[in-house]
Image (cartoon, coloured by chain):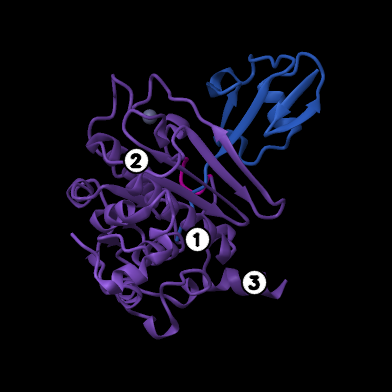
Amino acid sequence: MAFTDEQLERYSRHIILKEVGVKGQKKLMAGKVLIIGAGGLGAPAAMYLAAAGVGTIGIADADVVDLSNLQRQVIHTTDDLGKPKVQSAAETMKAINPDVNVVTYEDFIAANNIADIIKDYDFVLDGTDNFPAKFLINDACVQAGIPFCHAGIIRFRGQLMTWVPGEGPCYRCVFKEPPPKDAVPTCKQAGVIGAMAGVIGCLQAMEAVKFLTGAGELLTGKLLTYDALTNTIRTVNIPEDPDCAVCSDHPTITELIDYEQAACDGLSKDDVAEAAAE
Amino acid sequence: MTITVAGNKKEYEEGLTVAELIKVEDVENPLYVTVTINDDFIKSDTFETTVLQEGDAVEFLYFMGGGC
Ligand SMILES: [Zn+2]
């Protein structure tokens, strides 16, 4: 597959990188990445991966664009209010780069559909906003042997890690099982700086780029944490749990689980009005 | 004794347990924190009995569920 003149120009800043080059760009263009959640994390990740020329980008989300999304979900605009998020996201990606094949899944992922959705992809990004989904993505990817990048954000903090078969711990090695509903606040309840979604979503896109091109080191066996208030970025070693319920050689979880959907319905409009009045 | 907590070296009293350190450091959501010492997981049912040693490196890993 030879590049067209237009592609050579579009991807010239990649191609001159010794870690990418023509070979790496071709790997990106042959790559298939699934982004679960077209929200704060998924928005920048989808835009940068589309711009990078990733061949196929899948995007899964069942929501429509809401006014409260626009403070951070930069893939959607005011004109997109009320539109399915996957449609709005696909339109933006296609506008950035018409070469990209975008596949939309206007659905919430669940135990009965996730295996089917992830199976065609090389790499999965977790851009979801709740623990049941995060555990489901971990378990489904580990069981199917599909590499993925987990991330979470709240307030002024964010973190991410990458799992690749045989190369370090999975999310469940570190975090065992979802906390009880409302025990740990969601970003809807606690708030989040829009730019935090940008920082961590871009780091997830970077993991996908490194995975597809083979450049550098992935965040396997490591949790990268970012605290914006103290300007602290740390990479913490995380060990494998030899008794992990999913990724160990004697797993106790062999079927996918739909945990109770912990509330991403946190604050009512009245709560926000009350906070605004203080 | 000197312990490194989340990358920062600090002085603590001898005999400090993981459960006590969680209190001293005012760890957020203490019931749902994952702890490593020297890159090994410490099971939460041993926080009360695990005594920290000079030179230990402790990390607190937090649930972060946001993304939307
Ligand atoms: Zn595991």
**How far is mark 2 from mark 1, CA to CA?**
24 Å
- Which residue, given by chain and number where applicable, does mark 1 sit on? A266
**How far is mark 3 from mark 1, CA to CA?**
14 Å
- Which residue, given by chain and number where applicable, does mark 2 sit on? A138
Query: What residue type is disc 1 on?
Result: Gly
Exactly how many numbered labels are in the figure?
3
Q: Nearer the viewer, mark 2 or mark 1?
A: 2
Instruction: Name the image quarter holding the C terminus of chain A.
Output: bottom right
- Secondary element under disc 2, as helix, strand or loop, is helix
Give the mark nearer the N terminus: 2 vs 1.
2
Percent x, y of residue B28: 65, 41
Query: What residue type is disc 3 on?
Result: Glu
* Magenta-drawn stretch, dominant element (helix, strand or loop): loop
Please state the extent of the stretch shown in magenta in the rendering. A179-183
- Secondary element under disc 1, as helix, strand or loop, is loop
Q: Chain of mark 3?
A: A
Q: Chain of mark 2?
A: A
Query: What residue type is disc 2 on?
Result: Asn
**Could you tell whether A273 is left or right of A32 in the image?**
right
Residue at image location 36% in from the left, 54% down from the top: A21
User: The chain drawn blue is chain what?
Assistant: B
Q: Quadrant of ligand 1?
A: top left
Residue at image location 63% in from the left, 56% down from the top: A156
Residue at image location 81% in from the left, 23% down from the top: B12
Is residue A269 among the parts visible in the rendering? Answer: yes
- Which residue, given by chain and number where applicable, does mark 3 sit on? A274
